[in-house]
Image (spheres, rainbow, N blue to C red):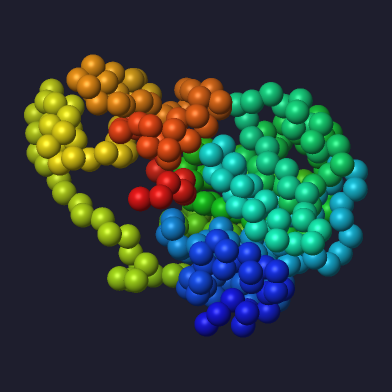
Amino acid sequence: MPFSSLDLAPELVHAASTHGFTPPTPIQADAIPAILRGADLQGQAQTGSGKTAAYLLPLLQKLLSGQRQRGRRARALVLVPTRELAAQVGEVLRSLGSALSDPPKVAVVFGGVSINPQMMRLRGGADVLVATPGRLLDLVAHNAIQLGQIEVLVLDEADRLLDLGFAEELQRVLAELPAQRQNLFFSATFEPAVQQLADSLLREPVRIAVAATEANEPAITQRVIQVDAGRRTELLRHLIQTQGWDRVLVFVASQYDCQRVAGKLYKNGIYATVFHGGLSQGARTQVLQEFKDERWDVVVTTDLAARGIDIVQ
């Protein structure tokens, strides 16, 4: 099934092809027609399934019609759990939108950086606002943005939004939105709390669940190695050096463990650094970019990097 059969505008079909979405992934093939029809949608798909484009492409098409927002308003709101995901979604959105003759105005807002530049960028409103819940509420409190005319709400990585303790903030955001809107709800898992949130938001939704298959399952070999606690980092170092691993993502339980493990690796000649919530946003952005550029062999991280961050291979 080609993208041209999904009722997308020719320029968006071209944009999808340019981004390597040929043919559409299963979540894209199922979600795009439903979203274009105006249906609410509950989508379950793993990271790497093409989920972001599955909602951004029809969202861009819907923005081709209707008046652009003026003043401190937005037409569509995408809520994500982390700053890195907000930046990533904004980057994909701008890239796909650049294919249009009149690209939409995109605003990306998150905490950890000064609020003033974000307030300035929102003075003329936005067609699409990509946000983390806490900073969005700060901007609403400062009267920098009004959410009363949102036409489409997207919750991306909804289970992570709840895992990271955003349930109360999420309810406060929802209270600012108009009752009549299209809701798109995406999550990798649907535990009872996540399903309860979906049921409270969605009206007669189209439900899509993309099961992992050999075609879309990443090539991952899983191993469990039992080792004395005091020798874990030593074993990690041994594996990195003997297996010839040149880009490694190591998950640990805390920011302190990040510093400890990365420090030990670095002292032993392995280029290792940390990535966790205690870093400034500038430092977090720099670490991710340097890891993508293969300037670090190892990044030691908490569950901050557990979902959705796009680093090739």
Identify the residue shown where x is 63% and y is 30%: 111
User: Depth check: 56 or 229 in front?
Assistant: 56
Q: Examine the image and state in which quarter residue 7 appears.
A: bottom right
Identify the residue at horizontal 27%, vertical 59% (top origin).
219
Q: Is 280 displayed left or right of 220 in the figure?
A: right
The structure residue drawn at horizontal position 71% and vertical position 56%, both measured from the top left corner, is: 98
Q: Is residue 160 above or below residue 35?
A: above
Question: In x, y percent, where is residue 177?
Answer: 77, 51
| Placement of 118 over or under 167, stated as above or below | above
- Count of residue discs: 0
In front here: 164 or 25?
25
- Where does the image place residue 172, in percent across and percent down from the top left? 69, 42
Question: From the viewer's perspective, is 178 left or right of 190?
Answer: right
Asked which quadrant contains residue 41, the reply is: bottom right
Q: Pick the residue in front: 132 or 273.
A: 273
Placement of 100 over or under 147, stated as above or below: below
- How far across and down, in percent of the image, does residue 185 sit? 58, 60
- Give me the residue at 56% from left, 26% from top: 282
Q: Is residue 40 visible?
A: no
- Left or right: where 144 falls relative to 208: right
List x then y, in percent, for residue 248: 29, 39
Whether residue 130 is visible: yes
